[in-house]
Image (spheres, rainbow, N blue to C red):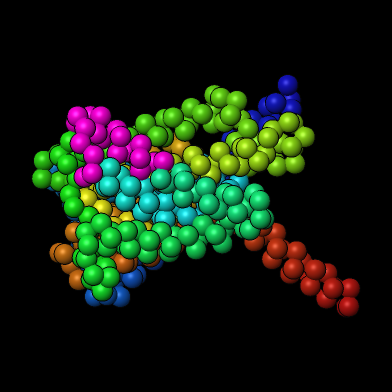
Amino acid sequence: MKAAASAALRAFADKKSEIVKYLLAFAAVMLIGAGLISFQGEDPVRALSAIWSGALGGRIEIGNTIRWIIPCVMTGMAAVVAFKSGVNNLGIEGQIYFGGFAAAMAGFLVQLPPVVHVLFCLLVGGLCGLLYALIPAVLKLFFRIDEMITTLMLNYIAILLTEYFTVLVIGASSSTASNALQTPPVYETAKLPVLIKGTYANAGIFVAVAVVIVVAFIYRYTIKGYELRQVGENLRFSKVGGVNVVRTFLSIFLISGFVAGLCGGVEVLGSHGRFVSRFSNNLGWDGIMISMIAKNSPFGVLFVSILWGVLKAGALHMERVTNTNRLTVVLIQALFVLFVTIDYKKIYAFFRGRFGRRAVQKGGAV
């Protein structure tokens, strides 16, 4: 009984310290952000007010914020599936591109009834993201090539390959400017319904929330989810416990790739209406940062993605109405990730041990 009580107290203390760390990190980045905005000759209060009004100031602004929340949730979940299970899938960006391109092809080459067409395109997008994630998984399992390297390199390959495929589809010259490359528009039956008229807020938000619920349910209530968690927490124990590590590792990569490809499909069918080269603009890296802030918690990703969407939508408005560069917000986001992921206890222990030994040595010398 005492052991259980002490364990509960330790867990509560750990959660409390995490909350304090997040609050301190938030306060620190706000101070740094205010300094950066002031350095650009702007009033920090005015700039922050512009972010707020640009993200939540009205119906159109809320719609634009929802538009950014959708990919943030989905890429965050793709990262959660991988990182929670100990797999370093840094190729989410590339999987988004292949999923988006495949969904666009299914959207303008195939004609189906409205709802069926959308589901078909999303399924095709998810499967292509899955297949692209299979490449680093196979290289890791059979050739022992580190997945961090392969997934990172495959991002660049995906961007260039989808551009090349787009050139083939539209029959353009290979010298065409990359930012002008886009496929023909998808059929209306393949487009995700718009939720708020005049914005890009679309039914993809329901897909994103469904992904959160399904992943959370799998990890919490199924045997497969238990195996996925165990592989990430203790690989040796998983092997001893009879978990098929190879099959589980493959499943992790494929699920993560499917979610990333699904995100690409939602972006194409909901926000662009066609595949546009380099459309992602680092959404995959946003997802990785969101997952890190959320500590690989599915519902934590949902909460952080809302904040991320507010910042993304608000930053564009801030740049329009003030002289503040929107990249200031990107820097603040990166600093927040840095501050919440640092293990301060280890840093404290390191310096305490280092300077403690010096003090003892000086005392002994005297």
Closer to the camera in the image, 44 or 142: 142
Residue 360, image x and y in percent? Answer: 83, 69
Closer to the camera in the image, 200 or 91: 91
Magenta residues (range): 107-127
Q: Residue furthest bottom?
A: 366
Query: Magenta residues: mostly which secondary structure?
Result: helix
Q: Residue furthest top?
A: 1
- Whether residue 172 is visible here, answered yes or no, is yes
Closer to the camera in the image, 32 or 276: 276
Residue 194, image x and y in percent? Answer: 17, 38
Query: Does residue 178 appear left or right of residue 155 in this picture?
Result: left
Q: Magenta stretch containing residue 116, yes or no?
A: yes
- Whether residue 24 is visible here, answered yes or no, is no
Q: Residue at x 19, y 29 (%)?
A: 113
Q: Residue at x 49, y 39 (%)?
A: 255
Q: Residue at x 27, y 47 (%)?
A: 105
Q: Is residue 218 above or below residue 234?
A: above
Query: Does residue 228 appear left or right of residue 323 in this picture?
Result: right
Rendered-image quadrant of the N terminus: top right
Q: Residue at x 22, y 65 (%)?
A: 172
